Amino acid sequence: MTDRKKVLIIGAAGRDFHNFNCVFRDKEQFEVICFTAQQIPKIEGRTYPPSLAGKLYPEGIPIFPEIKLEELIKKHKIDTCYLSYSDLNHLDVMDLGSRVLSAGSNFELIAPKDTMIKSKKPVVAVVAVRTGCGKSQTSRYVAKMLREAGLTPVVIRHPMPYGDLEKQTWQRFGCYEDLEKHKVTIEEREEYEMHIKFGTIVYAGVDYFQILEQAEKEADVILWDGGNNDTPFYLPDLFITIADPLRVGHELTYYPGALNIRMASVIVINKANTATKEQLTQLKKNIAKVNPEAIVIVGASKVVAKNPENIKGKKVLLIEDGPTLTHGEMTFGAAKVAADQEGALEIIDPKPYLVGSLIDVFKKYSHVSGFLPAMGYWDEQIQDLEKTINAVPCDSVVIGTPMDLTTLINIEKPTSFVEYDLVDMDGELSLSTYVTKFIKEFCKKN
């Protein structure tokens, strides 16, 4: 026990816990000293609880802010730091590596094969090269096809455990009341609501061994709905990666999305209806360079605005999906597309009217301009969002996040909700062809 390898896991409340559970839990050759946390507000300062950490950690494992990385390495004489979170520019990965190495520790990554759990049921994985490429709409597309084939898909969603980790060991979402029961954040609602709306059960949480065990009890097919650009937690029988022509080059320069583009059997180029010919051509060239065996499908993101009369000729405030526009680095989302389609008179910049924690969000993500990301990780931030929305001098609010914000906040102006779905492009290969092939090969019912 005295020769145990001292480990620090660099994370962001999700992949880090999964890597621990897969590689380090109950392994006496390792001593995991701590986690560090980044990206999501207020996740540091907690403890990975003993019930999840296992027999070797009766006090649990502390979680510190990433800013203390060098201090922790030196204080505890860490042998190896393992990078365990997603959607990082390759330069940022090596910046972290340089910090670790210069502080005296080794810097390592864990291969996907060591963290992809084998399921008893067929698995479709939907992942992406960046946050905001269109994973959710692709997952809904696949789930609909599975239901139409008489199968029961159960979605397992990438972790977003921002609350009590012990209570979030595994969570089942089968109805809207479950969202209230589990006190989910806006980010979680954005991912769960649309699946629930169409009758698909969703599981998520912290321990993806226990989650899979529960999901397999009621699933014909496991549908992995990935987060950010992370690799799948389960070994897929059909591996679908979404690429974004509006961010050409990111499929080669972001971790671990660059793994997803190389590992996929099917690659869907989404948003082709809003991309240029040059963008599509370059993206196809980049894909062919690193994964020439993949099937490449071109799809469109169909945007439909409800109550378009609240947009046409109006001064509007745009609310977009939070992660897509913050650490996903997109400069616009579905609300902007809808505003352009429906002829908005003017888009009002919310920046002069920001309240509370949203001021810090705009400081941290300086590229955010002209819209309001739907931030709501804790109650006070949801209140800040409500106050900001109602302070903006606009005629109406265009809501491009996939959850119904009006269930959480009181918006004092008329609204237009924006829905978006993956549709096949005329004259191109169809994703449905390969989902049908998967059903025939892996989902034959006894």
Image: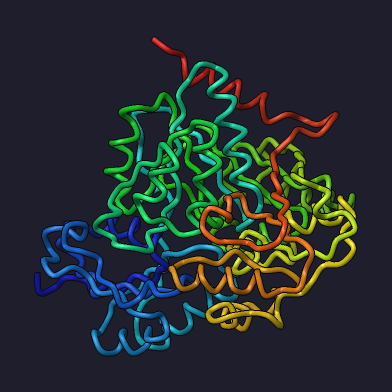
Q: Position of residue 281 (x, y in %)?
A: 84, 49
Task: Report whether residue 182 is seen.
Answer: yes
Q: Locate residue 14 relative to residue 435 in the image: left or right.
A: left
Along the line of sight, the residue nearer the viewer: 435 or 289: 435
Along the line of sight, the residue nearer the viewer: 325 or 389: 389
Question: Image point 72% across, 60% down: which residue?
Answer: 397
Q: Can you say whether 302 is above or below 257 in the image? A: above
Q: Locate residue 12 relative to residue 312 in the image: left or right.
A: left
The quadrant the N terminus occupies is bottom left
Question: Image point 39% across, 51% down: which residue?
Answer: 180
Q: Say which quarter of the image contains residue 375.
A: bottom right
Along the line of sight, the residue nearer the viewer: 212 or 150: 150
Q: Position of residue 161 (x, y in %)?
A: 37, 59
Q: Residue placed farthest to the top in the image?
A: 446
Q: Say which quarter of the image contains residue 412.
A: bottom right
Question: Image point 38% across, 47% down: which residue?
Answer: 204
Q: Position of residue 165 (x, y in %)?
A: 28, 60
Q: How many marks?
A: 0
Task: Report whether residue 114 is seen.
Answer: no
Q: Residue placed farthest to the front in the image?
A: 412
Q: Say which quarter of the image contains residue 359.
A: bottom right
Along the line of sight, the residue nearer the viewer: 440 or 325: 325
Question: Image point 30% across, 85% down: which residue?
Answer: 72
The quadrant the C terminus occupies is top left
What's the image's color scheme?
Answer: rainbow
Q: Can you say whether 62 is above or below 324 in the image? A: below
